[in-house]
Structure formats: structure tokens, C-alpha cells
Image: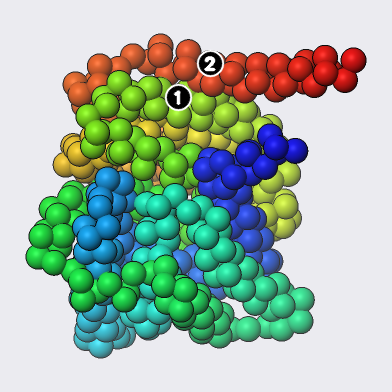
């Protein structure tokens, strides 16, 4: 019983549990929307979410990574100032973005109204203000490693929207506008809760200082580009497909494999969320060997886990597509000439490469090299965009769009290991041996415990 309590309180377990719960709610909502909306209308919803995700990478990329890093070793006074600066800078960025979107929608209304992005330009400026407090709360809680509270915030937000989508699927037929309004109300409610509980840091906004503003902005000028680049790696495919003659139907088709890839990345996001604060703290304290060991352990353990997950995804691709989106996506689409199952199988190969690529980025940020990580990510973005353009406009192939994801990730791994090796002196061999040691230790602990308990009972 003590062992069970220890496990459920452990950082990695709490982080993983939180991401699993949110992913289940998110994918469940996605599945119900895919079944209740037509192909073109569902494509519009995907573009609304994609546009919002891209802008939020810019808003929160300015300060989030820096706040996590600098809070790791901050005293109480510095902590209050850093949290206040995070809230202040986030508010300023939101104001700027809202003004830009409103102006674009005003001056280019005809073009936007006839595109798949009209919902985004119409509603996101309001949503941006209403989801700011709870997003600020998440980064402060992550820096403090309060994963239980993170789970509460995410469950409220995702759970309520899942409920709306489920009710819509079973009993109602809401329009896209009504679904977006429901999303806005839920975000406002979630933010109100974090403000009342004091988790968001808004009350410290007046404590922000020029020094802490500069500290976060200096670090953030690189991490912003990194996060924008990271988002582009996920959304560039969708954006370019939406601008191609293939249109919204292809966007909807391609979104199914992308959503399954997000499911595959649940453990990656969970373990990275715990690895970054640990590696940052070790780096701040000058413990380079500890940073290296953490990199090896997390990279190796996740790589072996992803081998199993990718194999499962490849073998059961058809079943997964059926569960997520229904039979309509199993067939070959007459417009694009492809089906989602084939793309899922290509993405399962892409999944094998994600752990080492992501951990090299985390490693560079943790040792205060966000500029190098930004260069790495934007080289990957350039490779991805070039690959997407060739795949879509020359070969008119959604399969080759997925293949481009494999190529740019290989480039990212090479660059990440090259630059990180200069600081930590790394070895690919150690990654895989550390992964084996990680699982061996878990097995030994379990078997030794069983042996001990059996011996005591004799």
C-alpha cells in the first residue's frame, strides 16, 4: 500500500495521468465532432483550433519556458517578481495579437469570410483574453511541480467542453459558431477558478520589475521562436494543405492521423514536463553530469516506450482510425485519392524519432542555450515547409507530406545531438543503455519487493 501511494504521488505518474485524462477527453471530443460534422465543416473547426494553437505558441512562448527555468532556483522575492512579469508580458502580448487580428478582420473581411479561417479571426481575440489566466496558472504550477493541481485545471477546461460536444452529438445540432461560444464560456469559467484560487499570478502583476521583465524577455526572444517553430512543425502541414487545391476535405482527412500522433505523444509531453525543471535546476547548480544523466535516462526510456507504441499504431492503424473517426475515414477519399490509415502508418515511423529530438531541445534550453535550440527548430521548419510544398503542389500526395515529417525530424536529431554534445559530451550508445537500465531497475524493484514480501509471509 505504501508503494502504491508513493507511485501515485510521483511527479512522472501525476504528469502522465494528467495528460492521459486530458488526451482521452480531447480525443473523445474530436471523435464526436468528426462524426457529427460534415467533412468541410469539420475542416473549418480544425483550422480554428490550428490557428489558435499557433498564436498561443507565440503568446506563451515569450515567457513560459523562461519562467519554469528561473523559478527553479528563485528566492521568494524573485519568485513573486518573475510570476508578476509573466502575467504582465502575457497580457501585453495578448493585447497586441488581438489588435492585429481585429484589424486584419476589418480590412480584409471579404477574403477572410470566404476562407476557412473566418471563425478564428472572428472569435479568437476574445478567447485570447479569457484563456490567459488559466494558461498562466499552468506554467506556474509546472515550475512548482504541482501536477495534481495542473490536472484539476485541465480537467475542468477539457471536461466541460467534452460534455458540450457529447450532448451536442447525442441530443443537439449546434452550429460551429455555437460550439466556439461554448468553448469561450468554458475558458472564462476555468480562468475565473484559477484567479479565485490565486494560481495564475495575476495578483502579482504590479510586482513585476524591469529586471525580471528583461530576464524573461531575453530568454523568451529565443524560446518564442522555438515554440512557434515547434507549432509550425505540427501545423504547417495543415496550413499548406488548406491553401492547396485539395481544400478543407483534405484538412479533415489529414487531421485524423495528426490527432492519433498527439495521442502517441502523451507520455512524451508528460515526461518532458518533469524532465525540464529537473535538468534546469541541475544546470543552474552547475551539475553538468546530472544534466547528462537525466538526458540519457529520459531519452532512452522514452525511445523504448515509443518503439512499442509505434509498432502498435502501425499494426492496428485501421482499428484506431475507425474508433476515432468512423467508417467514412477508412475509405479512399475521392478528392485526395488517399485514406487516413496509410498516413497513420507513416506517422507511426515518425513517432520513433520523437523522444530523442524532443529531449535534445529540452537539453539545450535547460543549459541556457535557447538560441541554439531556436536555430535547430527553424532549420526543421524550413525543411518541413519545403517538403510539404513539394509533396502537395508537385506530387499532390498527402502520404509524402507525412514522409516529410520523418525527414525533418532526422535533421533535428542530428543538429540537437551535435550542439548538445559540445556542452555535455554525449553518446548515442549511452541513450539506449540508460533506457535498458531504467526498465531493468523497475523490474528489479518489483521482483525484489515480491520476493521480500513472500519471504516475510513464510
Q: Is residue 432 left or right of residue 365?
A: right
Q: Is residue 449 left or right of residue 297?
A: right
Q: Which mark, by number, is residue 437?
A: 2
- Residue 343, compared with residue 206, is above or below; it is above
The secondary element bearing badge 2 is classed as helix
- Residue 66, compared with residue 166, is above or below; it is above
Tell me where residue 182 sits by quadrant.
bottom right
The secondary element bearing badge 1 is classed as helix
Q: Position of residue 369 (x, y in %)?
A: 19, 37
Residue that mark 1 sits on: 297
Q: Nearer the viewer, residue 25 or 188?
A: 188
- Residue 389, compared with residue 62, is above or below; it is above
Q: How is the image coloured?
A: rainbow
Q: Is residue 186 left or right of residue 3?
A: left
- Residue at image coords 64%, 44%: 8
Any part of residue 15 in sight: yes
Q: Position of residue 377 (x, y in %)?
A: 27, 41
Q: Is residue 225 left or right of residue 72?
A: left
- Residue at image coords 55%, 31%: 306
Q: Position of residue 230 (x, y in %)?
A: 33, 48
Amino acid at each position: 500500500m505504501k508503494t502504491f501511494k508513493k507511485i501515485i504521488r510521483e511527479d512522472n505518474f501525476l504528469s502522465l495521468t494528467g495528460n492521459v485524462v486530458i488526451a482521452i477527453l480531447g480525443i473523445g471530443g474530436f471523435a464526436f465532432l468528426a462524426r457529427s460534422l460534415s467533412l468541410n465543416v469539420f475542416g473549418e473547426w480544425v483550422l480554428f483550433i490550428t490557428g489558435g494553437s499557433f498564436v498561443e505558441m507565440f503568446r506563451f512562448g515569450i515567457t513560459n519556458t523562461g519562467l519554469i527555468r528561473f523559478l527553479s532556483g528563485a528566492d521568494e522575492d524573485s519568485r513573486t517578481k518573475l510570476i508578476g512579469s509573466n502575467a504582465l508580458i502575457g497580457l501585453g502580448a495578448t493585447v497586441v495579437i488581438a489588435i492585429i487580428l481585429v484589424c486584419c478582420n476589418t480590412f480584409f473581411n471579404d477574403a477572410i469570410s470566404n476562407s476557412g479561417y473566418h471563425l478564428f479571426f472572428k472569435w479568437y481575440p476574445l478567447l485570447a483574453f479569457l484563456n490567459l489566466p488559466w494558461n498562466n496558472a499552468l506554467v506556474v504550477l509546472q515550475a512548482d511541480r504541482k501536477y495534481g493541481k495542473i490536472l484539476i485545471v485541465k480537467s475542468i477546461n477539457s471536461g466541460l467542453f467534452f460534455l458540450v460536444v457529447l450532448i451536442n452529438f447525442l441530443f443537439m445540432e449546434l452550429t460551429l459558431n455555437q460550439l466556439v461560444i461554448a468553448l469561450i464560456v468554458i475558458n472564462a469559467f476555468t480562468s475565473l477558478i484559477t484567479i479565485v484560487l490565486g494560481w495564475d499570478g495575476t495578483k502579482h502583476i504590479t510586482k513585476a520589475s524591469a529586471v525580471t521583465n528583461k530576464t524573461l524577455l531575453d530568454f523568451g526572444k529565443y524560446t518564442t521562436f522555438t515554440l512557434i517553430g515547434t507549432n509550425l512543425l505540427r501545423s504547417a502541414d495543415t496550413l499548406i494543405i488548406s491553401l492547396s487545391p485539395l481544400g478543407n476535405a483534405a484538412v479533415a482527412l489529414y487531421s485524423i492521423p495528426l490527432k492519433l500522433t498527439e495521442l502517441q505523444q502523451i507520455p512524451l509531453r508528460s515526461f518532458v514536463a518533469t524532465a525540464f525543471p529537473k535538468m534546469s535546476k541541475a544546470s543552474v547548480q552547475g551539475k553538468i553530469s546530472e544534466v547528462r544523466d537525466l538526458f540519457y535516462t529520459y531519452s532512452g526510456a522514452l525511445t523504448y516506450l515509443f518503439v512499442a507504441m509505434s509498432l502498435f499504431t502501425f499494426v492496428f492503424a485501421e482499428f484506431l482510425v475507425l474508433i476515432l473517426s468512423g467508417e467514412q475515414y477508412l475509405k479512399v477519399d475521392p478528392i485526395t485519392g488517399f485514406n487516413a490509415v496509410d498516413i497513420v502508418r507513416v506517422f507511426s515511423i515518425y513517432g520513433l524519432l520523437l523522444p530523442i529530438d524532443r529531449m535534445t531541445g529540452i537539453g539545450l534550453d535547460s543549459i541556457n542555450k535557447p538560441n541554439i535550440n531556436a536555430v535547430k527548430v527553424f532549420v526543421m521548419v524550413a525543411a518541413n515547409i519545403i517538403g510539404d510544398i513539394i509533396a502537395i503542389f508537385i506530387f499532390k500526395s498527402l502520404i509524402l507530406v507525412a514522409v516529410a515529417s520523418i525527414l525533418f525530424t532526422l535533421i533535428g536529431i542530428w543538429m540537437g545531438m551535435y550542439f548538445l554534445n559540445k556542452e555535455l559530451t554525449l553518446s548515442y550508445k549511452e541513450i539506449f543503455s540508460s533506457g535498458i537500465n531504467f526498465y531493468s531497475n523497475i523490474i528489479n524493484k518489483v521482483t525484489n519487493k515480491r520476493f521480500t514480501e513472500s519471504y516475510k509471509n513464510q
